[in-house]
Amino acid sequence: MAHLQYFDYEGFGQSARENTHYSQAVRIGETIEVSGQGGWDRITSAVPPDIAAQIDNAFDNVEHTLRVAGADKGWGQVYKVRCYCTSMDEETMAHLVRNLRTWCPGHQPILTGVEVKGLAFGMKVEMEVAAHVG
């Protein structure tokens, strides 16, 4: 698996690698796959109780992870988004759409949204993305 490059970031990313044995992203040729990014603070790992703050943090965490993995345009290179939420109500959707419009002003990536019973660490949202960096 030498052709796979794995990436983590300082704080939560390093902690996840050391404690739970997974990486924040993997680069396979010209594609970067980002593991589930939640609404945590990257340095402290704190998860705010507010859904808007969690969604904002998750989008920012995705951007940071992409750049660490070599996507110099971050969200601008994302073509696929998977979003897991504990509620897909109007408030949650409004925050998701607001962030998609902010982070992806020039394109509309494909999106799958899944409502789940629960997420780790009391999170309300977790996002996986794929980006093409070629």
Image (cartoon, grey):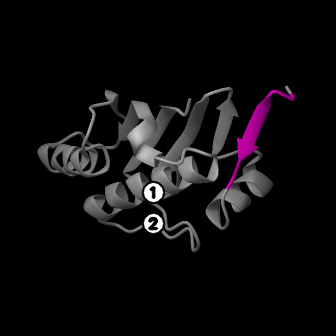
Could you say which is closer to the camera, residue 69 or residue 87? 69
Label 2 Cα crowd, 10 Å radius (few <14 / some 14-19 / many 20+): some
Q: Residue 75 in the image: state x and y as whole percent.
A: 41, 44
Q: Amino acid at mark 2?
A: Val
Q: Is residue 83 left or right of residue 71?
A: left
Q: Residue 5 in the image: state x and y as whole percent.
A: 76, 37
Q: Is residue 38 above or below residue 40?
A: above
Q: Is residue 31 left or right of residue 118?
A: right
The range drawn in magenta is 2-8
> Looking at the image, how many numbered discs can be counted on the residues?
2
Q: Residue 102 in the image: state x and y as whole percent.
A: 25, 52
- Farthest residue, direction left: 90
Q: Residue 63 in the image: state x and y as whole percent.
A: 47, 52
Element at badge 2?
loop
Label ID, residue 47: 2
Could you say which is closer to the camera, residue 106 or residue 15? 106
For image coordinates 81% across by 27% down, the residue present is: 3
User: Is 3 a magenta residue?
Assistant: yes
Among the 4 quarters of the image, the one containing residue 32: top right
Q: Amino acid at mark 1?
A: Gly
For image coordinates 57% across by 40% down, the residue present is: 35
Element at badge 1?
helix
Question: In the rendered image, is residue 92 in sight?
Answer: yes
For image coordinates 74% across by 41% down, the residue present is: 6
Contact? badges 2 and 1 (CB < 8 Å)? yes
For image coordinates 56% across by 39% down, the residue present is: 34
User: Is 93 a magenta residue?
Assistant: no
Q: Is residue 85 above or below residue 33?
A: below
Could you say which is closer to the camera, residue 68 or residue 85? 68
Give the spatial CA distance, label 2 vs label 1. 8 Å
Question: In the rendered image, is residue 118 in sight?
Answer: no
Label ID, residue 122: 1
